[in-house]
Image (cartoon, grey):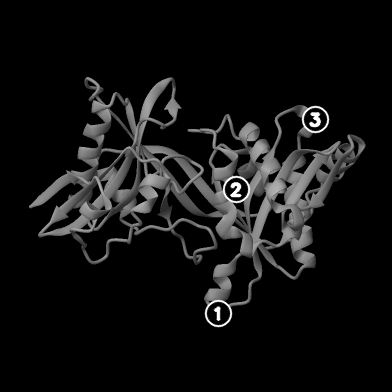
Amino acid sequence: MIDVEPVNSPEEAADRADAPGLPPFEWSDIARHGADAHWRATRDGETVARCSLWWTTSPALDGQLTGVIGHYAAVDNMASTRLLNRACAELAGRGCAMAIGPMDGNTWRRYRALADRGTEPLFFLEPDNPDDWPRNFGVAGFTVLARYYSTHCADLTYADPRLARVAERVEEAGIQIRALNADRLEAELGAIHALSLVSFRENLLYTPIAERNFIEQYGPIVPALRPELVMLAELEGKLVGFLFAVPDLLQAKRGRQTDTIIVKTVAVLPGREYAGLGNLLAARSHSVASDMGFTRAIHALMHESNKSLAVSAHYGAPFRRYELYCRRLAIRQRLP
């Protein structure tokens, strides 16, 4: 028999052992990520599924309140279905019209499920999950809200012939492209944060993030930074675009030569005057990476309608797919 119950403290979380195969969970993430509630499913005295819920800070979609399901893990469909159904009932009782997951509160943190693994090994900073998690959400009545792709580029010397004119226009406009200055890293990240808030505000499920939280998220990545791979485009000293890339450190952990860079983020201010700048930054990053001895690039985790995916199509084809799920809810009277 499966029981589903709220968990309100670290002490309560520790009173059940995790079933074999359930990924570990840090209780501190609940407070740090501002979750409104945490639920678990138990069977025979063990935790077999769990998730956190957000409704007070969750993003709106089509003018309606959403509820978010994150910190998700489950060992089988039965446990998952019981947990997700209870989570949806809780969110409906809080006035949410839709449940969205998996997402750890917002899109600045871990979200999406790896849905089509393909044959390539995982890369650095890529989210991973058991292959049955997408099925878990489907069995519980969720459908695909959005798809995302990672693209592999095996030729860093390829030059898009259209970029010569873009480069001329960028130079004529006075835009200069430089590498990250690691000696003033916090200031550089502050400028990247400010541009991200503008560039990403039309993205699906966007919510703003405080600068201190943004910089904290980059803390674990700092040791992996190669400043030459972070491109900053400036106009009169103001950041108007950036590309953030890092080496694929998982290759070294597998005993292989690190020959791949991960293009994690490309962002440009809106406006026709910046058209093509993202493509130019991608080409420059490939060129610099090639000069540094890298031979491949992965353009990571791009939304199916994102301009970055169109840019990446000039360099390679998708090799991995990720999905974000949603379920319509019958809104009930708000709980106190």
Question: Camera-side residue: 232 or 119?
Answer: 232
Identify which residue is drawn at 58% across, 68% down.
249
| C-alpha gap between disc 3 and disc 2 | 29 Å
Is residue 5 among the parts visible in the rendering? yes
Let me know if residue 157 appears in the view: no
Q: Amino acid at mark 1?
A: Gly
- Separation (CA) of disc 1 from disc 3: 45 Å
- For label 2, the residue is 215
The kind of secondary structure element at disc 1 is: loop
Closest to the observer: 289 or 32?
32
At which x and y percent is residue 15? 18, 58
- Residue 311 horizontal/vertical position (percent): 67, 44
- Which mark is nearer the camera, 3 or 2? 2
- The local crowd at label 2, few if under 14, some if 14 to 19, many if 20 or more residues have their Cα within 10 Å, is some
Instruction: Report crowding for label 3: few under 14, some 14 to 19, many 20 or more residues within 10 A (C-alpha).
Output: few
Residue drawn at (72%, 47%) of the image: 188
Q: Amino acid at mark 2?
A: Ile
Residue that lies at the very extreme toward the left in this rendered image: 1
Instruction: Report the Cα–Cα distance between label 1 and label 2.
Output: 31 Å
Instruction: Give the residue at x 44% y 30%.
Output: 59
Residue 224, by quadrant, is bottom right
Circle 1 packing at 10 Å, graded few (<14), some (14-19), many (20+), is few
Q: Which residue is mark 3?
A: 273
**The C terminus sits in image quarter:** top left
For the residues labelled 1 and 2, say whether their Cβ atoms are less than 8 Å apart.
no
The residue drawn where x is 63% and y is 76% is 257
Q: Earlier in the sequence, mark 1 or mark 3?
A: 1
Residue 164 located left or right of residue 195: right
Q: Which residue is mark 1?
A: 255
Q: Earlier in the sequence, mark 1 or mark 2?
A: 2
